[in-house]
Image (cartoon, rainbow, N blue to C red):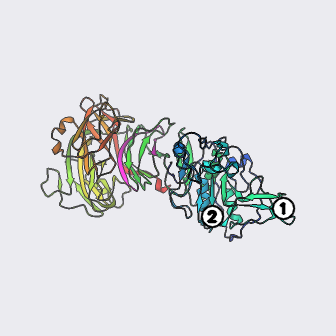
Amino acid sequence: MIRSLLISAAVLGSTVVVTAPTTTTQALDDTPWTLPSTPPRCTTTEADSGDVGHCLLVDYHDPVENGWGQPPAPGVGDGWSWNGYRYNGSPALEQWEAERITENTETVATLTPGRLETHVEAQALFEGFLREIAAKGYRVRDASGYGFRCTSGNGGWSCPSGDPDDLSNHAWGLAIDMNAGTNPIRNYTSQNGATACQTPMVTDMPKWLIETAEKWGLYWGGYGWNSGCADTSTQRTSVYRDPPHFEFRGTVEQARAIAAFNLGNDPDSTCFVTIDDDGEEADVCNWSGRPEADWRLPIDTGAPGGATAVMVNLTATEAAGPGFLTTEDCGPRTGERTTSALTFAAGDSRAVMAVVPIDDDGRFCVYRSTDVHSIVDVLGYIGADGEPLWFEPTTPARLTDSRTDGNCQPLQECRTGPVPDGSVQAVPTDDERPRIANLAVVGGTGPGFLQAGACDGVGDGATFSNLNYLDDAARSNLALIAGSDVGSCVYALTEAHVLVDELGALDSEVGYGWALEQPRRVLDTRECSDLWCDERPEAHTVIEVDLGTEAPGAAIAITATETAAPGFVTVGSCDAFDDVEAVPTSNLNHLEGQTATNLALVDLDDGRLCIYTLAAAQLIIDVQAELTAEHDAGLTPVTPSRVHDSRDA
């Protein structure tokens, strides 16, 4: 079953006019509406606009015709299980429920996560309605939505006909029943010469509640079925009233428009600009204030003239569940995504350096697989006009390790304890050139973050981060450390052991240029390929990987997942792993059970490298860029600047 992506509505193919919300101090009349009268029906134009608070949306077309999907024929074939009320969870419904049905992931009114199941495209309507009436003081004691069953008027809820036309709107997740105990379903008849429509019904629902439902496009069963009652003058000898029932009868497109209109006018909602799969901008809103799964947000990098790519620090934070971020072009998309720039766990805050091509407008897009905030800090531009620098790799050398006992190597800062809270610590280097280093934190007392850069550019006043960590986390990330005559430093927000491994320097005359490409996956040990077709790599495994290039170096994203124990992953020349018991540096650190990603800049030997894992783990490599001997595109470092933070939307 689709896990709820909170509440959102994309404006697809139409323009939604967002006006300022109106406020009122008038007290609500909570008198039960026992003799209701219907408002005028919405026109198609009104329904398509999303502004339906003054009319009744009643479209009697079949849900299939309205775009809600073709359900399985109830009870036909194998895989059906009847629980006395509905077929939910039957094997025959597995695909239907996975593709169409979702559930609330946050408490809505009094409904805890997972309590309310609805159609994924109608979720915003039902949850919006319930949130609003609860906020206005109506107590939602219970509510149920999706139930794969027929209407009782078609021979029983168990659907003996096997005809999808007999299904209730509950079977599409297009209806909810709320507070049935105080709103009984009854057949009212004419009495003492009065029409049935003049017989008061039993309900605790006031008029304002029903008007709120209609604002969200929902039809109230209290008006009655079988033509019902327009008002008390309607002549009926009997009317079947269903006051706990609310359902949506419009199209998918109308549901999106209604949700977008209401959310856009709600001062408590947050709206984002996203890019849809056609490459078009779409305004989306929700109440969580957090971008949702499958959204891709455009990032304006502020690139100078000539820039073709950007080096960034990408951070994911406040993740609703495990997932990944992918950097990509903002153009039209087809097919599944096969690479990732950053992986994270539920509730996680994790950062990674990435090298990303940009379009002519200096943009790229960030896609997320689950609800999560994203942050982008620009570290430098590739191909920019001016005086670019070239990457000169060096033999990895540890510059700082706060765990050392005093037996330090040349250039290494000796420490015997963790970097204290809010402390700036020097990183010794042999010259003032900018350099690329791998930062690692172990034994952190987080949550916290590291900054790396010129000593006068890190600390409380700086608005960027290179690495995020939690309590006892083992985290690593690549960093571009600016060159400075005041020296290089790291800053730790909260106490942590810090390790810094230099991987290379940026030079104005010698080194590699950059050849940019869209990310491509070259190794995934979870799948059988020419490089690996076995079980999970065991501890101390070395795998030779052919990147299929003639370039002398590459920028690669390394991911470790299904990790069996705390450990690290290192990439490099294959002859560096002749003694796997003495690998001196790491590119990626992880704990048991963690999924972690980091960028690495590596020299290649005829297009090949080796990857080593200290602990048993599945290993993934995605190529982000190639390093080339040609000086066509160099890197221009900049003072780190935050260009995107979805928490500030």
Helix, strand or loop for disc 2: loop
> Residue type at mark 1?
Thr
Residue 572, quarter of the rendered image: top left
Q: Which residue is mark 2?
A: 179
Name the mark on residue 195: 1
Q: Earlier in the sequence, mark 1 or mark 2?
A: 2
Q: Residues within 10 Å of mark 2 (few under 14, many from 20)?
A: some
> Residue type at mark 2?
Asn
Residue 312 visible in image: no
Q: CA distance from mark 1 to mark 2?
A: 27 Å
Relative to 401, say whether 67 is above or below.
above
Residue interval drawn in magenta: 347-368
Residue at x-position 61% and y-position 56%:
126
Name the mark on residue 450: none
Residue 201, quarter of the rendered image: bottom right
Helix, strand or loop for disc 1: loop
